[in-house]
Structures are given as C-alpha cells and as structure tokens.
Image: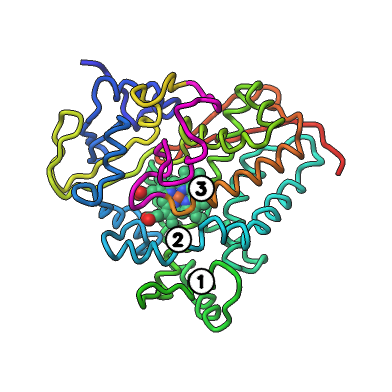
Amino acid sequence: AQHIPDILSPEFAADPYPVYRLMREHRPLIWHEPTRSYLVSRYEDVERAFKDKESVFTTDNYDWQLEPVHGKTIVQLSGREHAVRRALVAPAFRGSDLRDKFLPAIERNSRELIDAFRHKGEADLVDSFATRFPVNVIADMLGLHKADHARFHGWYTAVVAYFGNLAGDPEVAAAGERTRVEFADYMIPIIRERRENLGDDLLSTLCAAEVDGMRMSDEDIKAFCSLLLAAGGETTDKAIAGLFANLLADPDQLAAVGEDRSLIDRAFAETLRFTPPVHMIMRQTSAEVTVSGGTIPAGATVTCLIGAANRDAERYRDPDRFDIFRDDLDATTAFSAAAGHLAFALGRHFCVGALLARAEVETGVNQLLDAMPDLRPADGFVPHEDGLFTRGPKYLPLRFTPVAD
Ligand code: HEM
C-alpha cells in the first residue's frame, strides 16, 4: 500500500500539498488515530460535508474545540437556533453596511500600519502588517478605545497560540483559557454601557439586533466578539500574507496586479483556493455515512481537509499552479455562498465575514502596492509556511524603494 506521511509529521509540516495529493488519489478516507478523526480530502466529499443540512454532518464537536476559549458561539449552534443567531449578526457584515460604516476604519487602520514602515525601505509584511491589520480593524469596528487595542491584540495572540498548540504546552493552553475570563471581564461592562448609549459601531449593532423578538445576551455578544478574534483575525492575516507570498513567487502576476488593481479580487480568490488560511474544519456525524467508498460510523469526528480539496484535479485544471487568470474559479462569486472554492466553507456556516475579508484585502493590498511599488523579497529570503489547522507564511521580509507622499 502507498505510504502516506502523517499530518502530524515534519514532512507534512514542511509541505502538506504532496501529502494531500497522495490522500486524494490513494486513500480519500483515512482513520487518524492521533486526532481520533476521519480525514477526508476530495473536493466532492468536503463540499458534501459542508453543504449537508445537518442530516449527517453537524458542528457539535466545536463544543470541545472552541468552548474553553470563546464560550458558546454561533459556529457550535445548529438548526433554528443557528438560523436566528446568524440572522442577528449577518446584517452587520453585508456589503452596504460594510461600505457605509466600516470602510473608513479599514482604510485608517491599514494606513496607520503602513505609515510606520513605509519610509524604511524594508519590512516583514507578516509582523508589521498582516498579523495586526485585521485584529485592529475588528477592535475599531467594535468601537473599542484605541488605548485598548494593544490588550485586544494580546488576547488575539494568546488565542491564536492556543489553537496552534499542537505540542500541548500547558502554559500556552492556560494562557488561552485565561483569555476567556479576562476578555469577559473587559467586554461585559463595555457591552452593558453600550446598551445604554447606542452608537454607530458594530457593538451597538449587535446590542440592538432583534429577530423574531429575540436578542443576544451580554454573554452571547461577548462570545461572538471573542470568536471574531480568531475567525476574523487570524484568517485574514494569513490570507494577506499568502496573497503576497504567492504573487512574489511569480513576478509576472505581481506586475499584472500592480498595474490593474481590479485583479486583486482574482488574486485573493486564487490565494484562498491555492493556500487557504484554514486548512481543516471538523464536523461530527450524527449517522453512519459512506464517503469515497468507505464507512464513517455515527458519532465520529470528521476532519475536512480544505487544503487538499482545493487542489483536487477533479475540480481544478493544473491545481498546483497559482494562476489568478484561471477560468475554473470565478472571482465574482468567490466571496459568496456560491464560492467555487472551500476556503470559507459552504452551506449554513459559510463564513459570515467573507465580504469584510474582501474589503480588508482590497484596501490593504491596494495601499501596500501604492506604498511599495517595486516590492521584492529581501535578499536571501526563503519562503516558510507553518501551521496545521490554519497555515500561512511565518515571515515575509520585503525590500522596496520608499516613495515620497
Ligand atoms: C465561519 C474562513 C474571515 C467571521 C468561517 C468558516 C471558515 C471561515 C472556513 C466556516 C467554519 C465552519 O463551518 O465550521 C475564513 C477565512 C477568512 C475569514 C479564510 C479570511 C480570508 C472572517 C472575518 C470574519 C469572520 C473577517 C469577521 C470579522 C466568521 C464567523 C463564522 C465564520 C462569525 C461563523 C459563521 C457561522 O457559524 O454561521 N470562516 N473566515 N471570518 N467566519 Fe470566517
């Protein structure tokens, strides 16, 4: 039988894509003892799990994955409870609200970060921009005090470390769990105060939201804001860094995007397919199900390998090639539930923040390209990605000629 390296092996960590290919082609369904889950790698199987309306594939397993840090959040909910919660939060992330209310915050936060390094002629895009921009935007959208942004970023860092803690470091685990308490102590009084003085910010929108006479409790809102740290921060962070890493590896495509900024959407969509920020999402089966000829019993955890599915040759031509001009991925629908890739999942839990991510990426990439028109990798740069569940460039040192304002 074909040897397939383990997803916890150094070989996989260095480059998961050849391993994903072996899985898709030879063992599209694998029982994985260390994670006690079934690994599923083909596009059609992952798509089916995401689109399933909870007849078999549920999100119940998020209770143990997310609850210790965030409390009960929207991703754990199902059925009508989820539909109501989704209807409560989704309007704030739709196109018109985003443009009218939040574009200025997105533009401001991108500009502030770029201004801090644009005169230097060099920067690590990951450390100086990507890891900071989306989380600053969320804090700003929520209407938190600027002086608190650093604390907010600290919780973000602890949460990201918690979910990336494969080695099971007890201190990292404890720090992650502590954020649940610290974050609640910080947020709950702000939420109560905001209910009395509604403003224009996202927190006010969440406080005022009402669907069928139902509203969110202080605890619900706190949990949602906590979820946004990871769901909206780390993902967009890795998408921006990944987009630049992919373009830098192909100077012709970088030049094309530099000249025609309307191609940023295509570059983002193709980045989501080629190097998705979220590589794996888990589901739990409520009944026995057949997948790629094998059987998964009821009550099992299923690890849906987005990173593998998005490179399935049954779905995409020449899948291992980063090509912003490919015609089998439609950038006009890539940020909606009609997405032709799986990076935002699909179905009921399709990413609520997809349009926000797109607005952040469009703004951030545009401003970065303006500030560093001749950007290139720093001398001796060796690309390096890391992460298992979420994955992206670890650093991205750039050089560029500073431009005068
Ligand atoms: C859900 C990816 C940006 C908020 C999801 C899911 C994925 C995902 C894969 C599905 C989880 C599941 O089905 O179990 C991404 C990627 C992003 C991104 C790749 C950036 C490139 C954002 C942003 C926000 C956000 C900017 C908000 C600030 C959410 C929320 C959910 C979600 C609240 C849960 C939706 C539900 O359960 O109904 N995202 N996300 N995401 N995302 Fe995103």
Residue 182: where, in percent of width, then height?
48, 67
Residue at screen point 43% across, 50% down: 351
Residue 309 in view (yes/no): yes
- Give amino acid for label 2: Ala
Residue behind mark 3: 234
What is the magenta segment's predominant secondary structure? loop
**In front: label 2 or label 3:** 2
Residue at screen point 44% across, 54% down: 352
* Callout 2–callout 1 Cβ contact below 8 Å: no
- Give amino acid for label 3: Glu
* Image quarter hosting the C terminus: top right
Q: Residue furthest bottom?
A: 196
* Callout 3–callout 1 Cβ contact below 8 Å: no
Residue behind mark 1: 187
Closer-to-camera residue (254/302): 254
Residue behind mark 2: 90
Residue 290: where, in percent of width, then height?
15, 35
Closer-to-camera residue (81/326): 326
Q: Is residue 274 left or right of residue 127?
A: left
Q: Is residue 185 left or right of residue 168?
A: right
Q: Any magenta on residue 335?
A: yes
Residue 388 in view (yes/no): no
How far apart are the two marked residues, 2 and 1, measured between alpha carbons?
21 Å
* Callout 2–callout 3 Cβ contact below 8 Å: no
Magenta-highlighted residues: 321-350
Mark 1 Cα-neighbour bin, 10 Å: few <14, some 14–19, many ≥20: many
Residue 62: where, in percent of width, then height?
31, 54
